[in-house]
Image (tube, coloured by chain):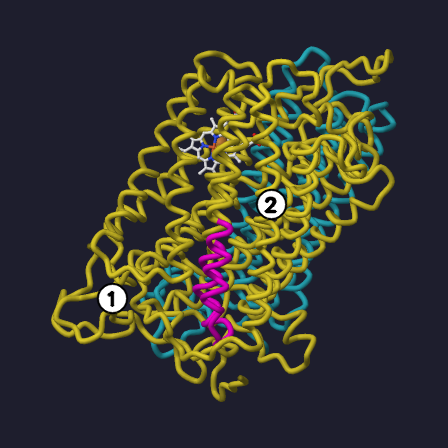
Chain colours: A cyan, B yellow
Amino acid sequence: MPQVKEREGSGIVRGRGGGGNGGGNEPGGLEAFPVPTARLGLWIFMAVATVLFSALVSAYLVRMNLPDWKSLSEPGLLGLNTALLALASLFLQRAAWASRRYDLGATRRNLQLGGLLGFAFVAGQLLAWSQFQAMGYFLVSNPSASFFYLMTALHGLHLLGGLVAWGVVGSRVPPSALSVQLCTTYWHFLLLVWLVLYGLLLLT
Amino acid sequence: MAHSHPGYHDHHIGPEPQSWWTKYVFSQDHKVIAFQYVLTALFVGAVGMGLSWLMRLQLGFPGKVELINPTVYYQAVTQHGMIMVIYLLTALLLGGFGNFLVPLMLGARDMAFPFVNMLSFWAYFLSVVVLLASFFVPGGATGAGWTLYPPQSILKGTPGSDWGIILMLVSLLLFIVAATMGGLNYVTTVLQLRTKGMTLMRMPLAVWGIFVATVLALLAFPALFVGGVMLLLDRTVGSSFFLPAIVQFGQQLPREGGSPLLFQHLFWYFGHPEVYIVILPAMGIVSELIAVHSRKPIFGYPMMVLSIVVIGALSFIVWAHHMYTSGMNPYFGFLFAVTTLIVAIPSAVKVYNWVLTLWRGNIHLTTPMLFAIAFLNTFLIGGLTGLLLGNVIIDFPLQDTYFVVAHFHMVMGVAAIVAIFGGIYHWFPKATGRMMNETLGKVHFWITFVGTYAMFLPMHHIGLTGVPRRYFGFENLQFIPESVRDLNVFITVVALIVGAGQLVFAYNLVHSIFWGKKVGDNPWRAATLEWQTPTPPPHGNWGDQPPPPVYRWAYDYSVPGEKEDFIPQTRPQVTAGAGGGGE
Ligand code: HEM
Ligand SMILES: [Cu+2]
């Protein structure tokens, strides 16, 4: 019965010179913060993405107050998509938990479900676009519509990037526990970003 | 030099490359990536310099050169600015020096994510290709000014508004992707891959400068990314993020309501940190050069670190000083003027500490040292004119004149490029095992240094008489005195000479790679880690040895009672406390 790989860097606590996560500098060891290097990299990336979406939201708030702005009625499908994304997050969380127990079967199952729901979300967003167009909102009909497309597109691109990572993680046999957990963290982050964007769209 | 490392299994170092392709082209080795960045950046830099010649020819000898019409002139202005700030300085300092120095100075085997690091270079390379391609598309490159302000940047009538602006924006987006991938590496490597004993407060200042600059880049570039995408949409599909209702050529355009000011905010929220993205690594490099070549410990190391961090933090709350004349609430103007002027404090701290480091040092006037000293005084002068411009009321008449051009060329353009030159002369022997020629180096230095002052001091004067920047011709502006026209001729002649003088550098660089004088591992007798590696450092940096632990800070020069006038960071402390510490 295959097992999930040991958590890299024996995980959480890595004292000075612990060299965890294959820090690579063997006998002498390393000066490092007690967090796996890959996780730190992900956090930094999420910080960058946060700035990106904050800039987008600020631009939205500024542009919103100009006279030609028309409020949108969002397609109802977005609610369903939100639920899909939340479910994806949930399953990935279960995968992360399973990986902590070194339960390969459950890790795999939940990881796959989470990713598939991610794809479903992307498909749902595309469908929402076409509904939106049927309602007569095109990319240039009004700045609010332009923002809608821009926001969903940028968020969707981040999610697609996540799906590529998900594919890589899932294709490893067995997937490393750390990378499953990193996928999960990223999915939660994208869920949070989406909730903020969606909330903004609904409220204005 | 090919070393193999039997028995080393290392996650943070790509496999030892076997083929020519993986060794020199798609390499994951941080040093090779550094050289790729440096060479590409120097190449576009040469293009940028050629463009400045075109501008200067027009300004010095208006109408004399057939080739230069208003379109060409505006394209030259724009592309010169963009190339120099982004594709030369940012790329060379972070991608070049960052890649080369960070792992070597910290005792790491490579960057944290070597594969992403390789992607970073290739994204940068692609962005350069797209940028250069924009010169050859119908309508040519964009001539909107390096700030790309809408509406004019995307409307008909501006040079390059067909394809040039589109390629420009695409190239910028690619560059941002590249900078982000590189930045992730530098930050993570600094945080996680320092060798044992290399605490944060023992890191050389060059690493501190690069580190903080990278953090700025990661937090500033996304704003430009968003602005760039929105501008691209405005241009290509006709959305109206930035475009207000406009009547052009008697026709009402089908846009309304957009806010050009919004773009300015997004741009300068990036743009001001950008200038520190460039200057902080330069400051770090200069700190190294000054310590090594004056054989003195850096004065006030903790303050030096603190001031880097404070400058970095402040740079996010001053951006609107570029927009005093764009119209804003007077209280905002006041606020931004205050924050802007506060930046002077940490900057002054740095200058004092450099001077005190030099004070009574055993100063060797080597080429790197000369360039470091040049940095100190150009940065100082540019900083002082910055203080003038930081005051709203002084800025009003000076904004968009040659005074601003003189300010930022002194403080950013020249200061950064002399730091880069100094850095190249200094680390060349580590990278190649050979020295660059000192005599040629000094010739290059004096041409550049004297030339700089000859060009930019008069330019302050031109600005003070009110001559606006970004004008093709001044024939009918009566207020411009005859003396300004003479000065413009003078500046142009100097610019041609200084430009040609850079050939000395190019020749020296290429010649020395093959025929330079061979030297040992540590020709400058420097204390930092990179000089304790074999030369040139092999794949994995430390050969078959594990990276050495570090026992002291980076600046143990001229320690009393020592035989040698430097102590490498790798030498253990004998008696507790001796020579270690901060000051
Ligand atoms: C005490 C320090 C500084 C102050 C108070 C200062 C202030 C200013 C102000 C107020 C402007 C706007 C001028 C105008 O457009 O009317 C300006 C422009 C500029 N500054 Fe500085 N500055 C300082 C240092 C620097 C440094 C260190 C750099 C670069 C490394 C830099 C690069 C620039 C650039 C590139 C511009 C012009 C941008 C453009 O309009 O194209 N400045 N500075
Ligand atoms: Cu500024």
Please tell me which of labels 2 and 1 falls first in the chain.
2
Instruction: Say whether residue B66 is left or right of residue A24.
Output: right
Q: Identify the amino acid type marked 1.
A: Arg
Give the magenta-colored segment's residue range: B420-448
Graded by Cα atoms within 10 Å as few (under 14), some (14 to 19) or many (20 or more), the crowding at tag 2 reads: many
Question: At which x and y percent is residue B245?
Answer: 76, 14
Residue at label 1? B552
* Magenta stretch, overall SS: helix
Question: At which x and y percent is residue B6?
Answer: 49, 89
Vertical arrangement, residue B170 with respect to residue B366, above or below: above
The quarter holding residue B19 reads bottom right
The quarter holding residue B52 reads top right
Q: Identify the amino acid type marked 2.
A: Met
Instruction: Say whether residue B469 is left or right of residue B421.
Output: right
Q: State whether label 1 is within 8 Å of ligand 1.
A: no
Furthest toward the bottom, the residue is B6
Q: Name the foreground residue: B307 vs A130.
A: B307
- Mark 1 belongs to chain: B
For the C terminus of chain B, the quadrant is: bottom left
> Which tag is nearer the camera, tag 2 or tag 1?
2
Q: State whether label 2 is within 8 Å of ligand 1.
A: no
Residue at label 2? B84
- Mark 2 belongs to chain: B
